[in-house]
């Protein structure tokens, strides 16, 4: 049990990393608010939030284009982030199992971008929203989460979860319920948020359908993230250590007798490690029949 919990917190788990980023930003904002409130300087907090949330006004967005990304990592309400992170975890695990880490992150980002763009577009074309557009801001990971939920339901519509009071429910019905709820709530106090939900939902559906046809809409995101990861996590330089000559002579005979068996097991272990890395990055379905057979054979020998 403790081992599995430790594995879940491993930094190589992209889903946990996304959740930690969201929670970290939330805690930093709330901590800043407490200190600024005590110093009677809450206007600084409002300024900070203003520069993390996405405006509906075009002039403001041109001044702060980065908010098209920062908004879907920013929450102010405890209940908002709680439900977003719960749904992200539950449905993200499904996508992560079948698609791997990279595509999970790509869909999270694509969903946030799609939700933000639809919100911005509709606030600038629908007449009832023109008066409140200059003061409207968008925040929260809901668009990204909706993309994950709908993406999981599109990929595995018959996947069943057990809900309290309802029993077993296929995730397609959960996704349909929340999409319809967002649609009928248009015109309410959270109209901008509902626009973003629908944009994220559409992206989740489109992403999976295109992926099933062989087109990865998030390939460019993975390329950028790989470049950024290379900058912040460079590979360590190799150091060559030369042992004393007498030690080499002493151990040469022993090495010759064990090298053959070690090379065989090392080669097999390297192959298994490569297959496991592939599952982590691209999902189990990306394996070839030969790779699945090797993994099965190795598991039987454990």
Image: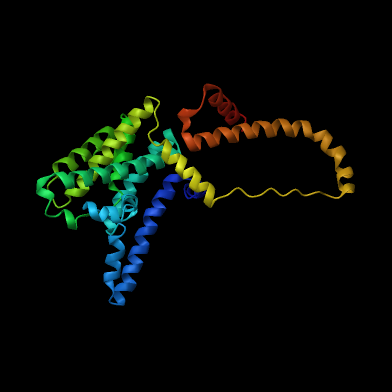
Residue 145 picture location, percent across and down: 31, 44
- In depth, the one of 88 and 36 nearer the eye is 36
Q: Which residue lies furthest to the top in this view?
A: 289
Taking depth in this image into account, of 82 and 52 the one nearest to the observer is: 52
Picture residue at 27% right of the left edge, 53% below the top? 61
> In the displayed structure, would residue 96 be above or below residue 22?
above
Residue 19 located left or right of residue 256: left
Q: Can residue 160 be seen in this view?
A: no
Location of residue 248 in the rendering, given as x and y in whole percent from the top left corner: 86, 44
Depth order, front residue of 154/209: 209
Q: In this view, does 266 lie to the left or right of 73?
A: right
- Identify the residue shown where x is 12% and y is 47%: 187
Residue 60 showing in the rendered view = yes
Q: In which quarter of the image is residue 169?
A: top left
The front one of 146 and 68 is 68
Outermost residue toward the left in this view: 128
């Amino acid at each position: 049990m403790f081992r599995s919990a430790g594995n879940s917190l491993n930094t190589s788990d992209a889903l946990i990393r996304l959740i930690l980023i969201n929670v970290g930003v939330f805690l930093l904002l709330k901590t800043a608010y407490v200190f600024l409130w005590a110093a009677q300087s809450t206007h600084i907090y409002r300024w900070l939030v203003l520069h993390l949330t996405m405006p509906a006004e075009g002039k403001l967005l041109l001044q702060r284009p980065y908010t098209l990304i920062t908004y879907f990592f920013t929450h102010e309400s405890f209940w908002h982030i709680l439900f977003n992170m719960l749904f992200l975890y539950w449905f993200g695990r499904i996508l992560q199992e079948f698609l791997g880490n990279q595509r999970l992150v790509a869909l999270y980002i694509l969903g946030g971008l799609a939700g933000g763009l639809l919100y911005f577009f509709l606030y600038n074309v629908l007449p009832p929203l023109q008066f409140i557009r200059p003061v409207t801001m968008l925040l929260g990971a809901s668009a990204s989460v909706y993309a994950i939920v709908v993406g999981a339901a599109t990929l595995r519509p018959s996947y069943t979860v057990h809900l309290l009071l309802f029993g077993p429910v296929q995730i397609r019905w959960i996704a349909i319920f929340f999409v319809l709820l967002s649609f009928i709530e248009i015109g309410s106090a959270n109209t901008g948020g509902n626009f973003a939900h629908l944009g994220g939902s559409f992206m989740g559906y489109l992403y999976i359908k295109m992926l099933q046809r062989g087109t990865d809409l998030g390939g460019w995101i993975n390329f950028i993230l790989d470049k950024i990861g290379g900058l912040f996590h460079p590979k360590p330089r190799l150091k060559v250590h030369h042992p004393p000559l007498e030690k080499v002579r002493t151990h040469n005979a022993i090495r010759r007798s064990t090298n053959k068996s070690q090379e065989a097991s090392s080669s097999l272990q390297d192959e298994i490690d490569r297959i496991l890395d592939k599952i982590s990055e691209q999902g189990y379905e990306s394996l070839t029949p030969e790779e699945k057979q090797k993994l099965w054979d190795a598991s039987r020998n454990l």
